[in-house]
Amino acid sequence: MSATIRSRSNALLRRVGAVIAGKDADSLVLEGERLVEDALRAGLALEAVLVAEPLAVLVERWSGQATVRLVDERLLARTSTLETPPGVIAVCPRPSPANLVELPAGPRSLVLVAAGIGDPGNLGALARSAEAAGADALVVTRNSASPWSTKALRGSMGSLLRLPCCHGVDPNEAAASFAARGFRGVRAATRGGAPPERMDWSGPLALWIGSETGALPAPARSLEAVTIPCALGVESLNVTVAASLLLFAAGRVTSEAVSGDD
């Protein structure tokens, strides 16, 4: 086993710092044992994994799949971007971006369009719900949080490493591409839309979710609206709660998928 890293000038630590600082747009920093495992299951080739000394047992687990080095615990904690450092930091390539014009366009196709979601934690949670509800892809428009930030990745519980994602898409381009390929567009609206149980959820379908304030870009404002009824006095739901309810209302997950039956 290689010697424990104890110097801040170590090349691997400098590499992690460069990715955290945004100096390599093609790489990600993953923090925590769970995200490293998710990346490996997603087939991503990890460049390097740094493990705090108290977690030395993880070196043997991952040594056949990446360069794994032990690091002084306090030194690794200072490198972390998290308030409570998990003791594991890895560098890996970003997942290949999905191509907007190649997204599935079948009768059960469902794409979630996150338009202007500014909170990376919310964006991560949206990706998690989209994957769980059987969506085929996540489209993230311009002026939204990055799906590759540490907060978004952790909030997604690994979904952003598995679910096809188009990031930084112009809303007009997205709307035009969906229309050209026969997608129906539906927008989440605080009020004035059809209730979920009366909505036609047949696909291919693009479900547009606006910013935390409910605002949507111009191309989506004329789309068919769906509104979740709320009790008197409640103005609206949290964006991730609302999106989750609508994603599951679309009915892409069957009892067979949940139970694992053939």
Image: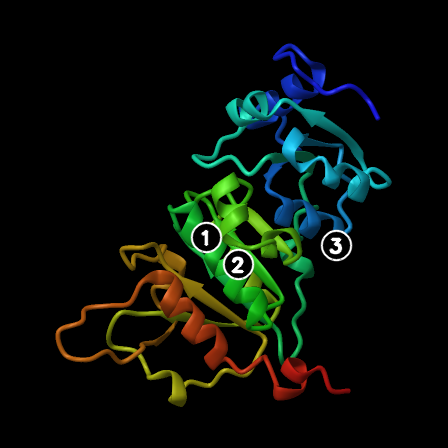
Which residue is under mark 3? 41
Q: 124 or 171: which is nearer to us?
A: 124
Residue 199 bears which disc, if any?
Answer: none
Describe the element under mark 2 as helix, strand or loop: helix
- Left or right relative to 177: residue 42: right
Extreme residue in the right direction:
64
- Say which element carries label 3: helix
For the question of whether residue 169 can be seen, the reply is: no
Mark 2 = which residue? 127
Q: Where's residue 207, x and y in %? A: 47, 68
Q: Quadrant of the C terminus?
A: bottom right
What colouring does the structure picture have?
A: rainbow
Judge the density around disc 2: few (<14), some (14-19), many (≥20) Cα neighbours within 10 Å.
Answer: many
Residue at (53, 65) in percent of width and height? 130
Quadrant assignment for the N terminus = top right
Residue at mark 2 to residue at mark 1: CA–CA distance:
6 Å
Q: Mark 1, residues whose alpha carbon is within 10 Å: few (<14), some, or many (≥20)?
A: many
Amino acid identity at mark 2:
Ala
Q: Is residue 227 above or below residue 209?
A: below
In the rendered structure, are the residues bearing label 2 and label 1 in contact, judged by CB atoms less than 8 Å apart?
yes
Depth check: give the residue in front, 170 or 112.
112
Residue on which the image places disc 1: 123
- Disc nearer the start of the sequence (3/1): 3
Q: Amino acid at mark 1?
A: Leu
Query: In the rendered view, would you say 119 is above or below 245?
Result: above
Q: Is any part of residue 31 visible from this angle? A: yes
